[in-house]
């Protein structure tokens, strides 16, 4: 079962602790380390999983080795993100690596994406839009609660949620264009 919990004020600090270990372990291979996903939006209900995005110049062996030395486990079955409709560009724009946390660390999803690719920008824009639009964040939380309550297979959760996330992303793109949104500094 997918469980959606009320926002926990400890999530940002938990991210910072995880990010500090990652920063020390991967060093300059990480161009950015950002808190993404629902736990990065104050007040937003979420699964109790900290989503971390590491932005890099290359998905290569030195990076994989550095993360594995920290105890992270690479999930080779997750090498691509969902591609929103009508976005042009090569499929390689949506490549990523996903890692599970080391034993004993709180639950995380660590996404590694290439600098400048649409899938690197997407979660940062999504996060910033929801931070700036609390009513949209509340509506999104309600969608997640209902999905979690009515889907018997947890694997269906992202499949059903993705189109709603795309709707928010499309609104976020218009918002970003209107305000001149940029990536801003890294979270760690």
Image: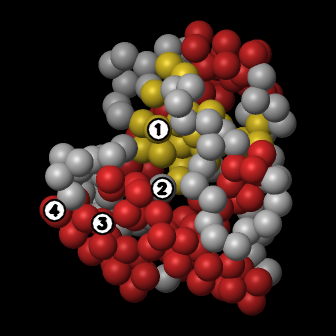
Q: Are marks 3 and 4 in contact (CB under 8 Å)?
A: no
Q: In the drawing, does residue 100 fall left or right of residue 138?
A: right
- For label 2, the SS is loop
Q: Nearer the viewer, residue 68 or 34?
A: 68
- Residue bearing mark 1: 109
Compared with 30, 84 (above or below) is below
Of the residues under marks 1 and 4, which one precedes in the sequence? 1
Residue 9, quarter of picture: bottom left
Q: In the drawing, does residue 1 fall left or right of residue 66?
A: left
Q: In the drawing, does residue 109 fall left or right of residue 114?
A: left
Number of numbered discs on residues:
4
Give the residue at x 42% y 44%.
50
Q: Nearer the viewer, mark 1 or mark 4?
A: 4
Q: Residues within 10 Å of mark 3 (few under 14, many from 20)?
A: many
Of the residues under marks 1 and 3, which one precedes in the sequence? 1
The numbered mark at residue 37 is: 2
């Amino acid at each position: 079962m997918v469980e959606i919990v009320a926002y926990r004020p400890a999530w940002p600090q938990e991210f910072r602790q995880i990010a500090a270990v990652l920063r020390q372990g991967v060093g300059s291979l990480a161009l950015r380390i950002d808190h993404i996903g629902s736990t990065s939006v104050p007040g937003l209900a979420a699964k109790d999983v900290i989503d971390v995005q590491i932005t890099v110049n290359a998905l290569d062996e030195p990076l994989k080795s550095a993360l594995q030395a920290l105890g992270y486990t690479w999930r080779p079955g997750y090498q691509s993100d969902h591609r929103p409709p009508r976005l042009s560009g090569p499929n390689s724009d949506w490549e990523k690596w996903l890692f599970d946390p080391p034993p004993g660390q709180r639950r995380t999803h660590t996404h590694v994406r290439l600098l400048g690719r649409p899938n690197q920008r997407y979660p940062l824009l999504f996060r910033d839009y929801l931070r700036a639009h609390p009513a949209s964040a509340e509506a999104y939380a309600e969608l997640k609660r209902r999905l979690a309550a009515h889907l018997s297979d947890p694997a269906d959760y992202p499949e059903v949620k993705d189109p709603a996330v795309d709707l928010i992303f499309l609104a976020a793109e218009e918002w970003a264009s209107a305000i001149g949104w940029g990536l801003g500094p890294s979270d760690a």
